[in-house]
Image: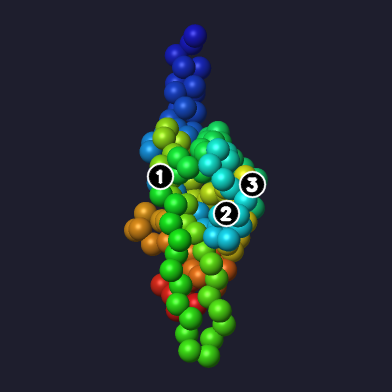
């Protein structure tokens, strides 16, 4: 290979290197309807976790991970309180899982029997500052800084 060609190949590789996500252990959380999960997902029910790079959840980041519901790292019922005169709060469960050897990606979709997403099906994951983009009004993603700080 000629020196000029080698330089071009190396330059292209260095240019595209930042676009390749490094594999790591990624902690994810996903909100679902608690009643549907409890009623329809007994032990042995496989759930599929898939990370995405776009808000429509069409561009997958890495391969999907299957985990049986009884093996989820943490499955918790979110306790919500009714405000006097307000609507009945939703019954929400949070699935927390560590996906091993996955590229970091901003969005997650979980599918399987008993999974009814609370809010958007494509849910934004916590950002680098540890701020999550979930709220209990059914908004699964936040798109602006105002949404993240709770003012908008």
What is the spatial separation of the Cα atoms under label 1 and label 3, in whole angstroms? 18 Å
At horizontal 56% and vertical 55% (from top left) the residue drawn is 38
Q: Nearer the viewer, residue 100 or 143?
A: 100
Estimate the x, y position of residue 5 in percent, counting from the top left: 50, 17
Per the image, the residue denoted by label 1 is 73
Q: Which mark is residue 37?
A: 2
Which comes before the other along the chain, label 2 or label 1? 2
Which image quarter: residue 117? bottom right
Q: Position of residue 122 (x, y in %)?
A: 59, 54
Q: Nearer the viewer, residue 121 or 150?
A: 121
Q: Earlier in the sequence, mark 3 or mark 2?
A: 2
Residue located beneath label 3 in the image = 113
Residue 91 at x, y percent in the picture: 53, 67
Residue 99 versus residue 131 in the image, above or below = above
Q: CA distance from mark 2 to mark 1?
A: 16 Å
Q: Is residue 21 visible?
A: no
- Which colour scheme appears in the figure? rainbow
Residue lying furthest bottom? 85
Q: Residues within 10 Å of mark 2 (few under 14, many from 20)?
A: some
Question: Is disc 1 placed on a helix, strand or loop?
Answer: loop
Residue 104 in the figure: left or right of residue 87: left
């Amino acid at each position: 290979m000629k020196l000029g060609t080698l330089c071009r190949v190396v330059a292209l590789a260095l240019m595209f290197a930042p676009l390749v996500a490094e594999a790591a252990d990624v902690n994810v959380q996903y909100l679902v309807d608690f009643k549907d999960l409890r009623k329809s997902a007994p032990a042995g029910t496989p759930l599929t976790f898939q990370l995405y790079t776009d808000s429509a959840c069409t561009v997958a980041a890495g391969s999907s991970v299957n985990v049986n519901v009884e093996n989820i790292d943490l499955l918790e019922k979110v306790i919500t309180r009714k405000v006097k005169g307000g609507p009945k709060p939703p019954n929400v469960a949070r699935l927390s899982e560590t996906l091993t050897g996955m590229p970091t990606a901003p969005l997650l979709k979980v599918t399987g029997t008993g999974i009814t997403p609370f809010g958007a099906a494509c849910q934004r994951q916590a950002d680098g500052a540890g701020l999550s983009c979930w709220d209990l009004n059914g908004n699964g993603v936040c798109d602006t800084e105002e949404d993240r700080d709770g003012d908008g």
